[in-house]
Image (cartoon, rainbow, N blue to C red):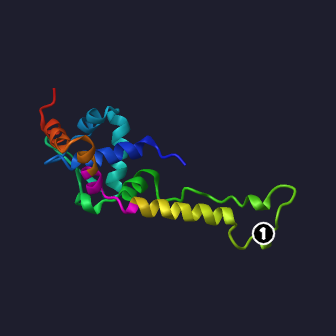
Amino acid sequence: MRLSGGVESALHCCVALTAADGPVPAARLAELHGVSATYLAKHLQALSRAGLMHSVQGKAGGYVLTRSPEEITVLDVVEAIEGPRSTFVCTEIRQRGPLAMSPDDCTVSCVIARTMTAADRAWRAALREVSIADLRSAVGEDHGVDVLARIGDWLRSPLP
């Protein structure tokens, strides 16, 4: 399974918004992350639809998180961008080919489907354990505690 680049952009935006002290325009977030504003706007709208952020209208408008960073999980963001569907879809391959089993013989999921479903659950549980606040802390540890202050200063700086 491969997640779209939208997940990465959305997570970076959520972390960046923790450094802002007010709404941040989509164009500013796009510039910060070196992506097109049109591309990012689609993902910010998905985050808004999921209730993770909302847009503030007006001259000083932009996006803000709707909950504290401690209350937004990585899984929340992944599901806002990718949807809640499982990463594995069983197509009942057992019922095809020259040795196909009958549907009556396939009333229980096969070991492959059970294994993949368990892996998906474990992956989601791991993502549910990490919050945007956790990511914010790790960014500070990885790049120096002042990185978020620098991001906040840059987001507040006047547009060129």
Does residue 99 appear to the left or right of 93 in the view shown? right
Residue 131 is covered by the magenta coloring: yes
Look at 46% across and 43% down and name the residue there.
4
Does residue 47 appear to the left or right of 157 in the view shown? right
Horizontal and vertical percent position of residue 152 = 16, 42
Q: Could you tell me what secondary structure mostly forms the magenta stretch?
A: helix
Horizontal and vertical percent position of residue 62 = 21, 44
Look at 28% across and 50% down and name the residue there.
138
Q: Nearer the viewer, residue 141 or 41?
A: 141
Query: What residue sits right under mark 1 in the picture?
Result: 103
Horizontal and vertical percent position of residue 70 = 25, 61
The magenta region covers 128-137
Label 1 environment density (alpha carbons within 10 Å; few <14, some 14–19, many ≥20): few
Residue 19 can be seen, yes or no: yes
Residue 12 is covered by the magenta coloring: no
Secondary structure type for disc 1:
helix
Quarter that holds the C terminus: top left
